[in-house]
Image: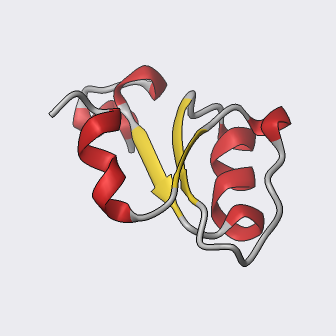
Amino acid sequence: MLDQLSCGLDDILHVSSSFRYDLMTAHDLGIRHKVFVARGHEPANPYYGYTEIKDIGGLAAVVGL
């Protein structure tokens, strides 16, 4: 699919509030840029290399807007 979009793993920003079902999978797929919306449902795990925000309103600052 990435070939069809003419992009690579460095071109993707994965944003999720589910650590177990989304963030871990994105990491396993090799997506490097990840944002975790920490809503207090799951513990943090820095091994997976993500930027943590408290709510979706913090996403603009992560991407420099």
| Residue 21 spot, x, y in % from top left | 71, 69
Q: Residue furthest bottom?
A: 41
Image x and y of residue 5, in percent: 24, 37
In the figure, is residue 62 to the left or right of 37? left
* Residue in the image at 78% along x and 70% along y: 42
Quadrant of the drawing holding the C terminus:
top left
Residue 23, percent across and down? 66, 54
Task: Give left or right: position of 56 versus 32.
Answer: left
Q: Nearer the viewer, residue 21 or 42?
A: 42
Q: How has the structure been colored for display?
A: secondary structure
Quarter of the N terminus within the rendering: top left
> Across the whole image, how many numbered discs are drawn on residues?
0
Among the 4 quarters of the image, the one containing residue 31:
top right
The vertical placement of 55 against 10, above or below, is below
Above or below — where is 53 with respect to 22?
above
Kindly identify the residue that appears in the image at 83 percent across and 62 percent down.
43
The foreground one among 13 and 4 is 13
Residue 15 % position (x, y):
45, 54
Identified at 75% across, 41% down, the residue is: 28
